[in-house]
Amino acid sequence: MAEAVESPGDPETTTSRPLMRDLKAVGKKFMHVLYPRKSNTLLRDWDLWGPLILCVTLALMLQRGSVDSEKDGGPQFAEVFVIVWFGAVTITLNSKLLGGNISFFQSLCVLGYCILPLTMAMLVCRLVLLAEPGPINFMVRLFVVIIMFAWSIVASTAFLADSQPPNRKALAVYPVFLFYFVISWMILTFTPQ
Amino acid sequence: MAAVDDLRFEEFGDTTTSLEANPDATTISIEDPGETPKHKPGPPKGLGREEDDELLGNDDSDKTELLAGQKKSSPFWTFEYYQTFFDVDTYQVFDRIKGSLLPIPGKNFVRLYIRSNPDLYGPFWICATLVFAIAISGNLSNFLIHLGEKTYHYVPEFRKVSIAATIIYAYAWLVPLALWGFLVWRNSKVMNIVSYSFLEIVCVYGYSLFIYIPTAILWIIPQKAVRWVLVTIALGISGSVLAMTFWPAVREDNRRIALATIVTIVLLHMLLSVGCLAYFFDAPEMDHLLTSTAAPNQTVVTAKSS
């Protein structure tokens, strides 16, 4: 982790090689989220670039691009950002207070990366919404969001569950469920102008 | 929990001092919490000392207070201090939720379930779930009510989440604070056998709000009668949990003040539920009135309501 952060700021090295290394690390973690196995890669070499990219993408896609955004009632860019980061911090604090032995940033890293399925769901929903609106449109979006929601939960539980004491696993996993549920709700109720 | 066994005192100095302070108190030794329910003497025999035993849960309240104070020994700026408030297992949280859903007359929620181990996990996450349940259900219910209208444009009213969060968390923390302050003040005037710490009161309030989560989800049904029946049931259950918890704390006091306290507690609870219903959920009848009027009025109303 240390070298991934320090090398971009180091004036001696060229920027392209460390950048490629960082991008490769981020890409590798994306693959780990998409095919969750019990591996320690996400936990060992944590970084927050992936979560940041995902969060910004999600927040941008949840915007409508309308002039009169107050009447919309939908979440603003800053609100999505706050929900994702504040939610992730709260869950991390919760799991640490319950006695989990995962570090603060490792947990943020896992929760942030596991938003990837939901970001993909948002992409799909935006594409589906270009078509004719109606109940079929809604059913397709609902189906996609439910699948991706389940995928996010499975992915994050695969990484986080082992760090909790065994008699408190459910207590630590429930807030993760609530977090991804709220994000899924925001994605599902997105309506363009 | 090993804490209770480890902290059991050999000397009887505490018992005698507490007897001097309060000659009417029944001093009972602390046993393993798992065993005490078996020693309970059957159903309550009415007012008097037997009811005291039931409500106290066979624990001396002075000793339990002392033990609660002993547990939190780390200074408040360390992380370990706050970890003591999350020292609960899954089954304990489920037990406490079950206790808040099934108020048994004569059983005190605090003595039976919390037993000097108040947690902040339950209150915090129940309130968080309730905030989102109310906001999402309100949104969904409004959508279903206005479903047939051509001119209705669905807006996910995101602002309401922050409003709901402010209301619920303010209720779950400020009302216990006020109640605790009031009980401490009355305790200085009239000697009460039962006194609760601030965290125990927060805990009771937090768990008593659990019933509102399924209630909020069922409020999606756009029938006025159904909603009011749900309000009554939820208020009945959680109100009785609160009333039975706090009755022993004010019983020794002036009868009028005791009754006024209990009535205020239940009234505030009712205000919360009715207020949430009124603010987050549109009335179903409004829909039928609006469809008969002209369309421009409708868009004005829906724009104003978001």
Image (cartoon, coloured by chain):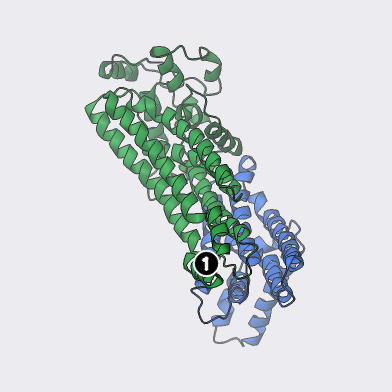
SS for dot 1: helix
Q: Please identify the quadrant where the N terminus of chain A is shown.
A: bottom right
In the image, A144 versus A193, the foreground residue is A193
> Residue B2: x and y, percent?
52, 29
Q: Residue A162 location, x and y as percent? A: 67, 50
**Chain identifier matching the blue colour in the rendered picture:** A
**Could you tell whether B70 is left or right of A32 in the image?**
left
Quadrant where the C terminus of chain A sits is bottom right
Q: How crowded is mark 1: few (under 14 residues within 10 Å), some or many (20 or more)?
A: some
Instruction: Find disc 1 in the rendering and name its residue.
Output: B302
Q: Is residue A3 visible?
A: no
Chain B colour is green
What kind of residue is marked 1?
Thr
Rendered image quadrant of residue A144: bottom right
Identify the residue at horizontal 32%, vertical 18% (top origin): B13
Q: Can residue A121 be seen here?
A: yes
Instruction: Tell me where residue B276 appears, x and y as whole percent.
Output: 47, 50
Q: In this view, does B34 lie above or below B114?
A: above
Q: What residue do we see at 30% from left, 22% from top?
A: B252
Q: In this view, does A106 lie above or below B257?
A: below
Q: How many marks?
A: 1
Q: Is residue B251 left or right of residue B139?
A: left
- Along the line of sight, which residue is nearer the eye, B257 or B270? B270
Q: Which chain carries label 1?
A: B
Residue placed farthest to the left in the image?
Answer: B189
- Residue B139: where, in percent of width, then height? 57, 59
B170 on left or right of B132: left
